[in-house]
Structure formats: structure tokens, C-alpha cells
Image: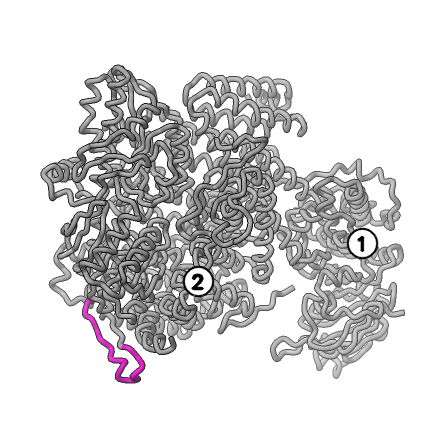
Amino acid sequence: MLAHIIQTLPQVIVDGLTLGVVYAVVAIGYTMVYGILELINFAHGEIFMSGAFIGTTVLLILSSVGFLSSVPAILAFIIIIVIASLATGFLGMGIERVAYRPLRSAPKLITLITAIGVSFLLQDIVRFIAELKTGNYIVSAPSLFNDKIHLKTSAILPQFGDALFKSSFLVVLIVAIIMLVALDFFVNRTKWGMAMRAVAQDRETASLMSINVNKVISVTFFVGSALGGATGVLFMIQYGTIDPYIGFILGIKAFTAAVLGGIGNIRGAMVGGLLIGFLEMFAAANLSTLTHGAFGAEYKDIFAFAILIAVLIFKPEGLFGKAVVEKV
Amino acid sequence: MNVLEVTDLTKKFGGLYANTNINMSIKKNSITAVIGPNGAGKTTFFNMITAVYKPTSGDILLNGKSLVGLKPHQVTKFGIARTFQNIRLFHDLTVLDNVLVGMHHHLKSNWVGALFQMPRTRHAEDNAKKEAYQLLEYVGLADLLNESAGNLSYGAQRRLEIARAIAAKPKVLLLDEPAAGMNPKETKKLTDLIHDMRSKLDITIVLIEHDMKLVMEISDYIYVLDHGEEIASGKPDDIRNNPRVIEAYLGKGAVANG
Amino acid sequence: MRKLVDLFSQNKKAQLLLFIVYVAVTSLSLILAQQSVVAFLLLLFSILLLYFLKLNTKAKWIIGLLIVAVLIPFSASQGQAYESYMDVATLVGIYCAMALGLNIVVGFAGLLDLGFIAFFAVGAYTYGIFASAQASKFLHFGHFPLSGESFWIFILIGGIVAAIFGILLGIPVLRVKGDYLAIVTLGFGEIIRIIFNNLDHPINITNGSMGIASIAPPKIFGIVIANASQFYYVALAILLVVIYIVTRLEHSKIGRAWKAIRDNEIAGQAMGIPLVKTKLTAFAIGASFSGMMGVVFAAKQTYVDATSFTLLESTTVLVMVLLGGMGSVPGVILGAAVVTILNLQVLTEVSNWLNQLNTNGVISVPDALSPAKMQRFIFGLLLILFALYRPKGLIPAKNQKYDANKLKKSTTKSMYVEPQVSNDKKASGGSEI
Amino acid sequence: MKSKKVVSLIATAALAFGIISGCSSSKGGSSGSGGKQVIKIATQSPLSGGSATLGEAIKLGAQLAISDQKKAFAKKGFDLQLVPYDDQADPKKGVSNAQQIGSDKSILGVIGHLNSGVTIPSSEIYEKNQLAMISPAATATDVTDRGLKVVNRVCARDDFQGPAGADFAVNTLKAKKIFVIQDKTAYGSGLAEAFRDAAKKLGADIIGYEGITVGEKDFNGVISQAASKKPDLIYFGGVYAEGGLIIKQARDKGLDIPIMGGDGLDSSSTVQIAGDSVKNVYLTSVAGDVTKVAAGKKFVDAYKAKFGKGVESYSSYGYDATGVLLKAIMSAIDKNNGKLPTREAVSQAVRAIQDYQGIINKVGFDNKGDNKFAKVYIFKFDKAAYPAVQQKAISK
């Protein structure tokens, strides 16, 4: 039993990493918005999904005009990801402006409900645009990076099996890491990043320090949403098939990741995302082996949600978060 | 006789001491003031007594029984009620309902009784409403009984908070800056009310206040906190002339010069 | 004109007369027209009109009951679409009770629960398992399926089991607050659904994704209840009980405690309200309504599987509460009715109508835009619009008003003998608002 | 206060009237064009949601059959119409629609559903209304095993399709070690279970039986597990949305073994999603390759001309099921001296059909409502193109 688990481990790590970085970048979107507004932006999963669809649209247009065959795939990819993240960035800003800003002083329950509303709205709008154009809302895109790479992990340790992946995995991984590092730099080293942190700490004081709070919140939404949209493109590149409902469940899992890492904490969200991705993949691959067939891979989502509940109960501040004491 | 005894009460947030070794003995039916500059740890002290925060060490005794480790609602049941520095009313409830909520722990009615309209429950509810109305009359809000609490003026909200707190029939009433934001006329009425509560309702009152005029006029005894530590205690006149207190309020230079 | 309106709003008799005419016309048209959704909806609408009439509560209740229990079934039974109308009406009843349950949790106690449908599932499976041969697959005693007579006990059992689940869910979950609570309950709802969908091994309890078929229909005095028109009365009866319980609880000590912790948790605790116990009661009572209706649902469908209990369903119930008005019992009932009818009848009818026009070549609407598919779009839009422009819903919650005169004539002796500072209360209280 | 109340009243009224005005024009008259009596055929299938492609195919097949026979009915003085309902693959919606269908007396028969989970509760309502139902696609055994008089199907049952697939996998493809994946839906589990049990009996070793979550896109975990166990064949019980991805991801993991699925994979979307990976994929389908027979080719062309898209697996069965229903209605009309027959008469006439020549195979119902002539066909994808190549047709 243990031999089997060890044998699949390299492959599980590779796959878990793929899913994990997707979760991580989406989780950052949640964490940034939560950190600054204390709002779970339920629609963030849908922004991710919109990014995937916008990316696919651009890709299909590029390939229909014959652009793809004339330039290297990586260039096409960069064009796609930039367009998609700009578009979703503005989408996120627009959503904040229309649906969240008027409610900033309203009870949180109400804002949360609008967020759910926005998420439903986006799902259906994307659905009927896709359906109008293609007659089917499950959309497949031509793949850009298709080379298979064979990782000889068995050479490291004889018990290991080999891991196989597509070159798209490397693209996803590298782009995600670039985004994470860039974001970390942005938040910790730039003027805007400092303003964001100030607003997250104390909105009123920040506004007294001549920080334009609305602008900072807009920028936060732009950055978070652009990251989400770009992750959508990564997802599309990796899996090739998307539908309007991918954002919802993925969003919830990414949120789980954000909570696991400590919500509001950007580095925590990264670690949380990777952890959830890996655990999920591990559960899918090994649950039935571990339980001798009593519980199969179909229980892997319970695994993810159970982690969420357990974390919230025993360490509500998350792995890297700080406990907040409510002021009375 | 002391109603409330606090011994060596300490609260640490992370590495920060919010309260250090505070000792107090509060006499029955007295009015005690806790004063100190901003951030002296006065509200933290109240929060520990009402179990909102758990003390890091030390003990709180109400009539000889320890309150440490209890839940906030249990503390209320034991006989301590409070108001809040930043008013915490039930905004969407009516003024009368706010007072009724204050009676929660001694109101003899349960949901089974409510479902089947049992006479006992009905009787208890009726009496509670009448009592609540009288309380509103007492604090001067009877005309507004059906208004939502959130619609009241600032001063009225403060008084409603007091009415709600005494509805819990406390032995000790903690008032957290009751006069904050009041004009002199309102403050005067508040002073009367506090005096009256002590004499008519047989309540021991502990209050945090920045209005020194009010404090000096009303208190039997004063404790002064600074940086989480108790720096002085005594009768109003003693405190007025205590150099450490003046230093705490006005800075070191003030004492040297004076 | 304005005067006329004013006059009319004061004149009880004129209102009543107009109301009777309205009811008579709509029910007649429902009787005469072979199949008219419009007439049916207009007749249902009379309940809402009744709510706004200037009559005393008792009279309203009697008239309302007459309309709901006698007039509507009678008028509808004259046409072909009887069972169809009654099916919709039954579902309206089921959703009303559920929405009222959720209203306790969200509207009164202020706890956002996004996994509420789980309790409905619990109720449905409780009856489904024992009223079909399913139970014999894991219990090696007793004879299953139980007979249809057991249905009546199962309404209670379903409620209790759901309440137990509510408490089990509540104990861990209530340690988290606000937004977190929403996410955790959402996760919990999904977990329950996944478990029901997977529990065919190691022990076959729910028959997994194959669902439980051939659930025994309820029986009473030897009569088998199998038609929607009969289930209508079952649902109606339970709904009435639920309404009774909710209104009673709302104005009791526990109701005040729920609203108090909703408005301010810390002050609520400081006033002696035990937080966990109060929240758990809200969860348990809300869940039990849902569980009871789950039993009815399982019996009506004769089939349960996990696909009926998705997140979309939880959100649907939430939309009902929000649309109607959080914390407002009449509002929530209206919200539940509007959403259910919109979903089951109106969207389908409009789609069919569009489709007819399409096939006849009158207009050309692409399939992707068919209203029946727009459920999420419509819900999303409703949620946003209502949250932005009407956060208190169609019929906002109202506080119970007390009669000062009744309270003044006090016979009991109070400890607060004479009012001291109330002499110039005008100056200090009222005038500053 | 007062104005608030008025506002809320107006808002409510506006909403309610909005609802009402929307459907005021939807009142179906009982007389159609030219004073003819209307006969309606309802379809119920998912037109939205994850299996919309398959549901749409049923509807379009029925639509084609109805437009083909409109003239024949017009001659007898009837106006034939189609009313498509969307059951959203949701049992609750299906039952509610069934009630509405039951109440529209001009509807004489129902074509549907796609999912067995929806068929089972909805058919209880049809039974009460004595309304004939013919399913082109519901394969679960429970659909007909409950012995309802009005329930029929033209496709094969799970306990025929599953074992037929198992037989092909074990005896023709010589698979010894089989890894089974299913999608935890009534359809997918039913099929996968039937396959698993039959394959075990035939001596194959089932080295894994795992479930996945519908709607997800990453199945690498389960596939890694499969890959490490080195199976000869992977069987997937489920539909194309997940099936296509599983095929693709399995190929990416270097699993070039045959992958087999049921009729849920029999869709152009499988190819669209899986792309080139679809090579060496086998599937069992209850619908045969229509292009193999002359009548089928004509059907494919007519379908393409009318709807502008290619046929899907259930298009032909939707067409055949409707054909069977219309034939039964016709004979019921004749029996009733050219007048509109009762629903009861129609459902009896449907059950009485013994020898209807469909596009690919014959239709004749046994006493439970199953098609005696139902066949299971085995297909193989040789290239990334739909439809796949038919390998074998298996009769009972």
C-alpha cells in the first residue's frame, strides 16, 4: 500500500502543483479584496471564469486569422493573457463600482448577497454568449503547448514512479510564479501597495492621510481581478475545456485555500492554494487505497471542505494569519 | 461591605500589557469612577469583568464568588450589567423591545410556553412589558416606546442603554463613558439619574468617565489607571491633588512646574 | 384623485366590496376558462390584496383560509389543469415553509446559511429510506417499506432528525462569524449532498446516485394520497402550523433574543443572552421546518436523489427570503410564492410561448435566450437589484407596536416607583430626533 | 410610513402583473390553424445544463419527425404540434412539467426523458394521466421494471448495454485488468455498475472503481491512480463533458490503452473536447450508426438541412420514438373513426406496436415497455471525427 503511494507521489505532486498554483492565484484575489473590504467577493470565481472565456475567444480569433501558425506559441500566449487580464481587471473594477460601492456602509449580509447575485449574473451572461456563438456552452480551445515531458523521478529514488506532464504545466507554473512574485513586490514595495495596506489597516485614518480610498479599492479590485482573469487563461491552457460554471466550485476551493493560509495574508493564500491542490490530488489518487476501497476518489471534495471547517473551528485565523480581537 | 473585589487583574494582548495587577474593592451601593487618559486600559478592565475578555491572571469576585471563566451572559445573570462606550443598542428593535431583551435572564417564559400560549408565560410577558414601560418612564423615553432604537438621538440612546442595563436587575452597573457626547444640560440630567439609581434601585455603580466635573461631583471613590496600571485611588479630593494623576494627565512637566 | 385614493384607503366597506368582486371575478374566470394560468395567478394574488386590506387580523385569517382551502381548489378543479395548478400550489407551500425556516436563521438571527437545502434533503431521505425497500438493505430487522400510514409520524420524525442535523452543524459552525459562517454552511451543504450521493458503499444507506425509487405514498383512513390536489392540503396544513409557530416565536422571548444577537452580538451577550444556545435554537427550528417539508417532498415525488439538493436550491430559498423581506413573515411567504411560481410556471410558460412563436416563424429568438434557461440570470439580477434598491424586500419587516395605554395601567408593583427625570422628557428625548 | 406601504404595494403589484402579462398570451387554444383539431406531442429533455447537447438532439429528432408527418395528419383533419419542455435534468422540474403536460389535454404523448433519474418520478405523473411516454434514452432498469402501463423506451437497458460492453472489452479487446471510473450520477453509476459486474463474471480483474465530480475539469488524481495500476482498459460511465477530458488527460499520462464508455460519450462534443486523444476510444451505444443504412443517410441530410447541425447519438432515437408515437396515434385515430382518440387509447396503441421500422432498427414493445429489438452497438474512434466507426451490433 505504502509502496503504491510512494510510487505515484511524483506524478501526484506535479498534478497537485498545477491545480495548486491555480488555486493559489485565485485565492490571492479573494484575500486582497477581503483584506481591504472585509468582503468575500463571491464573484471572484466568475471573474476567473470570464478570464478563461475571454482568453479562449482571443485564442480562437487569433487562430482563425492564421496568426497562430505564423508566430511562436509563447508570443500568442502573452498576447492572450495580457488582453484577458486587462479585460477582467476592468470587469472587476466595474463590478465593485456598480454592485459593492453603493453598499459599503450596508450590513455585510447584504453585500454578500449582491456578490452572489453578480456571480449568478456572470455565469448566465457568459453562458448565453457562448451558446449563441457556438451552440454549446462547453467550449474547447486549441492547445498551445502540447509537448510531453517525461520526468525521470525514478532515477532519484527507485521507489518512485516517473512523472509525465505537458509543457503547458511549465508555462502555468512559471507564469503563476512570476505573477506571485510581481504581486508580492507590488504590495510590499510600491506606493500603491503601501496605500492598499494602509486602507486595509484602517480606512478612515488612511483617508485622513490623503489617500484616495475609493481609488485604492478600485486598484485592488483591478489587480485582484486581473490576476483571476490571467489564472483563467492558465486554466484554459492547461485543461483545454471550459464552461461557465468552472468558477463557482473552483472559487470556493480557492477561498478555502485563502482561509487556510489566513485570509488577508497574501503569502498565506499562496501556501494555502498549493496545499489544497496537493491534498485534493493526493486524496483522489490514494483515498481508496488508504481506506481499502471504503471511500473512493468521490470523497475528495468532502476532504477539502472538511479541512475548511476544521481550520475555521480550530484556528480561525488560518495558518499564517493573526488573530483579530474585536474591539468592544 | 464590598460587592466587587478585583485582585491582581492582568490582561496581556500578545506581548502587550493592557492591564497590570489591578486591585479594587468596591463598596455596596457606592458610586465608583475609573478614570485615566486614553488608552489607559479602562475599557479592557470593564471587558474583563463582563467576561468579554478572559483575564490573563487575577481574580474577580462578586459577593465572594469568582466570575473568572464564566461566559458573558452568565456574568449578567450573576448580577453585573453594563453599557458600552460606543453605544451598542439593538438598532432595528423598538425601544421597548430593547428593554425587554435586557430582562432576558430573569423573564420566566420559554419557547414552549410561547408556542402554546401558556398562562404563566403570558402573564410573565405582560408583566415584563409593563415593567419595561415603567423603566422607560424612569429614564424619560416612554413616549418613544415604539420607535426603532436606531432612530433615537444620541443622548436618548445613552439613556436607553442604561434602561436596558437596569432591566437586567444588576447588583453592579458598569457605565462606560455615559456622558460622552452630551451637552451640559444632558450631563446634568444624567448625574441626577445616576444618583437616583443608586438611592432608589439599590445598585452599585462603577463608571468610566472623562468629564472630570461629573466624576468629581458624583463619585464616592476614584481609581486612576495609566498605561494599564493603577496609579492612584481615593476620594475625589485626594485624587484632585495627587501629583501622579496630574502627571499622567498633563505630562511630567506639569508637576515640576506646578 | 388623491383624495379619492385617501378616501378609499380609509373606507373599509368599499375595500371589502371591491375585494369580493375581485375574488369573484378571478375565480369565475378560472372556472370558465379551461386552462388559464393568468386567472389562477390573479386568484392567488387576492391573498396579497387581502393582506393590505383594512380589516382586523382574525377576519383576514378566516377569509384567507377560505380562499386558500376552499375557493382555490374548487375553482381550479373545474378546469383541466387542476393537478398542474395544485402541484405548483403544493410546491409553493413547501417552499414557503422552507423560506420561513430560513427566515428564522437569516432574517431573525442574522446567520447567513448557504447550505439550508441540506436539511430538506435530510427530511426527504429520512422518509425515502424507510418508506421504500431501501431500509432493508442495511437494516436486518423490521419490515420495509413501512406503510403509507407512517407518513404522518414521519413528518415529525423528519423535522426532528433535521433539527438534530441543524444542531450538529451548528455546534462546530457557530464558532465562526459572518462571512465565514456563510462559507462554512455552504461547504456543509455540499458535504451533505456529496455524502448522500455516495453513501451506497461501504454501507448502502441512500442508494447513492441511483436514488431511491418507489417511495410509498401517504395513507390516511385507507385513502392513498397520491395526487397533487391531495398533497396540497398536507402542505397547507403544515404551512399553517409553521406560520403559527413562527409568529408566536417571533414575539416571544426567544424571538427578541434572535433579533438582539442579529443587531449586536456583544450587547446581546451582555444582556444575558446565551449566544450558542440561542443560535442553535434558530438553526434547529429553522431546520426542522425544512425537514418536515422534505418528508412531504419525498412522498410527493415518490423518488429522491441528490440532484434535488444542489447549491442552486439553497440560493433559491435565500432569494425568496431576501425578495420578500428578511425577518418579515408575510414578506417571506410572498417571496416564496413569487419565486416558485416564476420558476415553475411563468418561465416555462413564457419559454413555451416563445418557442411557439419561433416555430410558427413569427419571431426568431435564439435558443440560448430561452427564459427557462435564464433562472440564474433572473435570480442574480433580483438579488442585486433588491440588495441595492430595496434591501428590506417587498414587504419590509415591521416591529410589533405596543399600546402605551395598556402598559400604563399597571397593577403590579414595580421596584421603580416614581419616575424622576421624566418631567421634561420632551426636551431630552423626543425633540432631538 | 404610509408612502412606504404604497411603494411596496405598487412594487409587488408590478412584479405580479409583470409575471402575469408574460404568460397571458400563452394560453393555448384548442383549435389550431384552419379550424383543425390540435394534437400536441411534448418532449421533455434537458435543454440547458451539462447534458444539453443530448437533450437538444432528442428535441430536434422529434421536431423532424413531426414536420415529416404534419401533412399526413393534416389530411385527417389534425394539426400536429410540438411542445418542447426543458426538464433541466432535475427531477423536481421534470415532475412539475409533467403535471403541466398532463393538464394540457391536447397533448397525446411524451417523448423523453434523457435521464433515468428524471424519467422515474415524472412517469408516475404520466401514469396518472394515462399519457403515453416513450423514452429514447433512459436506460436504467427501474424505468420499466416498475411495470407502468404508459412507460416505454426504444433504447436498450443498462443491464443489456453494460454487459454488452463488458463482453466486447473482455472477449474482443482481451482486457484482463480493467479500471472503472463513473461520474456518480444515476446514469453513470448504473451503467458502470452493470459493466463492472458483467466484466467480473467474464473473468476480468476490476482493479479500481472510482467516482469523479461532474462539472470539474481536473481528473488527474484518479487517472494517476489508474496509471499506476497499469490497466488494459479504462471504462468510463458518464457523459461527454467529463469523458472527453478523462480521455485527454489519460493520454497525457501516457495511457494509450483502449478507453471505453457508454452512450453518454456518443456525441460530437466528445471529439471536440478530447481532440486527437479520442483515437482508440470505444463506446457502446444504444443508437446505431445512422449512416450505415440508406434511410439513415437521408435522415442525416434532412436533419442537417433543417437545423444546420450534425446528428447526435439520440437524434435518430428521438426521431424514431416520435415516429412510433405518431404511428400509434394514427392507428388510434383510425380505430376511433377518424376522431380524436383518448390518451388511454393512444397509450394502449403504443404498447401494441410490435413491428415499427425505425431508421436503424425495429421497434416493438414487450409487456414492460422495453424494445424487443433494441440493440447495442459498439463504436470505435479511429480519428478525431464524429461519428465513430461502428464495430459490431449486438442483439439480445
Q: Residues within 10 Å of mark 1 (few under 14, many from 20)?
A: some
Which of the two residues, C313 or D251, is positioned nearer the viewer here? Answer: D251
Q: Is residue D260 magenta?
A: no
Same chain shared by disc 1 and disc 2:
no
At 87% from the left and 43% from the top, the residue drawn is C412
- Horizontal relation, residue D83 to residue D291: left or right: right
Residue D73 picture location, percent across and down: 21, 22
- Looking at the rendered structure, the secondary structure element under dot 1 is helix
Snapshot quadrant of residue A324: bottom right
Against B51, residue C11 (above or below) is above
Pointer 1 residue: B189
The N terminus of chain C: image quadrant:
top right
Against B18, residue A59 (above or below) is above
Hey, what amino acid is under mark 2? Answer: Phe
- Horizontal relation, residue A15 to residue C413: left or right: left
Q: Residues within 10 Å of mark 2 (few under 14, many from 20)?
A: many
Which of the two residues, A36 or B132, is positioned nearer the viewer here? Answer: B132
Which of the two residues, C288 or C364, is positioned nearer the viewer here? Answer: C288
* Chain that bears disc 1: B
Snapshot quadrant of residue C358: top left
At 52% from the left and 32% from the top, the residue drawn is C224
Pointer 2 residue: A255
Give the magenta range.
Answer: A146-161
Q: Is residue A82 visible?
A: no
In the image as oriented, which residue stretches furthest toward the left?
Answer: D294
Residue C410 picture location, percent across and down: 85, 40
At 17% from the left and 34% from the top, the residue drawn is D357
Can you tell which of label 1 and label 2 is closer to the viewer?
Answer: 2
* Chain that bears disc 2: A
Residue D302 picture location, percent across and down: 14, 36
Residue D168 picture location, percent across and down: 21, 56
The C terminus of chain C: image quadrant:
top right
